[in-house]
Amino acid sequence: MNRAWIKPGVWGFVIGGVVTMIVGFSWGGWTTTSTTDRLAMDRSTAAVTAALVPVCLEKSKADPARAQKLAASATFQSGEANVEHWIGSIDGWITAANERYVRSLDEADRERSTRLDAEARERDRLQELNERFKNL
């Protein structure tokens, strides 16, 4: 057996696999599990919404207190008596938006840390493999 061709053969196999993955994910339509799960969730949410909107509209039309609810929601009450109420409502909206923003920043930071850790592990693994192949 000719050992001179083993090292180039292994490198050709590795490089061919990497090129195949790059082409597959970039142009071949391959997806990861997380991407597929996200797409399935988006589609199912849209389908459920499309299915339930007519039902909700029919139920709201059949509601006997519909006219009262519409009148109450359309009435804007101004004046000094309601200022405290409006300030409280606006403060609640701002607090909720701020909490969502902080949560999204925390989530993005966790995802970034996880990705960086995974990239560092992969880099270490590839360096170890490279050292092994150098010694062949």
Image (spheres, rainbow, N blue to C red):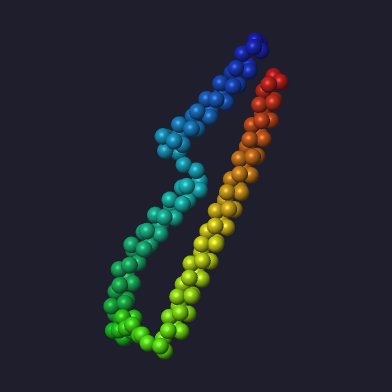
Left or right: residue 56 compared with residue 4: left
Q: Where is residue 19 shown, x and y percent of the image?
A: 50, 28
Residue under the point 65% across and 39% down: 121
How far from the left and from the top, in percent, is residue 33?
Answer: 50, 46
Q: Residue furthest bottom?
A: 81
* Picture quarter with the N terminus: top right
Please identify the quarter of the rendering in which residue 76 is found. Answer: bottom left
33 or 118: nearer the viewer: 118
The percent coordinates of residue 17 (x first, y second) are 53, 28
Query: Could you tell me which residue is drawn at 53 percent across and 66 percent down?
Result: 99
**Does the image show residue 10?**
yes
Q: Residue furthest right?
A: 135
Image quarter where the C terminus lies is: top right
Residue 66 placement, left or right of 39: left
Q: Residue furthest front?
A: 80
- Between 119 and 12, the one lying in front of the other is 119
Q: Residue at x 46, y 47 (%)?
A: 36
Q: Is residue 129 above or below residue 106?
A: above
48 vs 133: above or below: below
State the residue in front, 68 or 55: 68
Residue 69 seen anywhere in this rendered image of the structure: no
Q: Is residue 89 above or below residue 19?
A: below
Residue 10 place in picture, x, y as percent: 60, 21
